[in-house]
Image (tube, rainbow, N blue to C red):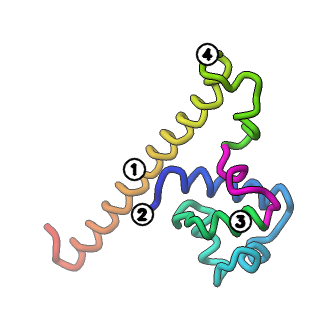
Amino acid sequence: MIEPTDIIYAQKLRGLRLGRNLKQTVLCTKIGISSQQEYSKLENGKMHFTDEILEKISQAFEMTVEEFMMPQGNANISNSPNANNNSPHGSVNHISLIETVLKSKDETIIMQKQHIQLLEKILKEKGYYS
């Protein structure tokens, strides 16, 4: 099942790939995905990011899994001088992450509703659904 974090990771993966001017086929090989089509599903948030895939992506981009999982632009949050809970500035990064997850959740719900509508249409056309 696709999680909201999968969409965030997909966006980060795409950004990293484009930032390094790599082709999808190159990353397929590096992370052990069998085809460019499967990789495309991963990068478009239509495939779950397993622990194994996260590890291989992190290795491909020479970072830790934790660094990959961190929101973009928020590297080393825990080492930030404003990262403590008593600072109003320290919570900004966390709020941004929560907003991103909620937006991704909403986008996922919209995609699922569209998928249900398509399935209902197919079932109607086949006479299984009225």
Q: In terms of depth relative to the viewer, which is nearer, 105 or 67?
A: 67
Q: Which of marks 4 and 1 is nearer the N terminus?
A: 4
Residue at image point 79% right, 71% down: 23
Residue 35 against residue 21 in the figure, above or below: below
Instruction: Return the x and y of residue 27 as percentages of the image width and height.
Output: 75, 72
Q: What element carries label 3?
A: helix
Q: Could you tell me if the residues under marks 1 and 3 are in contact, i.e. CB atoms within 8 Å?
A: no
Residue 26 against residue 89 in the figure, above or below: below
Q: Is residue 10 magenta?
A: no
Q: For mark 2, what is the residue?
A: 1
Question: Could you classify mark 3 by the number of other residues whose Cα lies within 10 Å: few (under 14), some (14-19), or many (20 or more)?
Answer: many
Q: Nearer the viewer, mark 4 or mark 1?
A: 4
Question: Could you classify mark 2 by the number of other residues whose Cα lies within 10 Å: few (under 14), some (14-19), or many (20 or more)?
Answer: few
Q: Which of marks 1 and 3 is in front?
A: 3
Q: Which of marks 2 and 3 is in front?
A: 3
Q: Which amino acid does label 2 sit on?
A: Met
Q: For mark 4, what is the residue?
A: 86
Could you tell me how many numbered marks the image carries? 4
Q: Could you tell me if the residues under marks 4 and 2 are in contact, i.e. CB atoms within 8 Å?
A: no
Q: Which amino acid does label 1 sit on?
A: Ile
Q: Is mark 4 on a helix, strand or loop?
A: loop
Q: Which amino acid does label 3 sit on?
A: Ile
Q: Is mark 1 on a helix, strand or loop?
A: helix
Q: What stretch is highlighted in magenta?
A: 60-70
Q: Residue 50 carries which label?
A: none
Q: Which mark is residue 109?
A: 1
Q: Which of marks 4 and 2 is in front?
A: 4
> On the rendered image, what quadrant is the N terminus found in?
bottom left
Q: Which amino acid does label 4 sit on?
A: Asn
Label 1 – label 3 distance at C-alpha: 26 Å
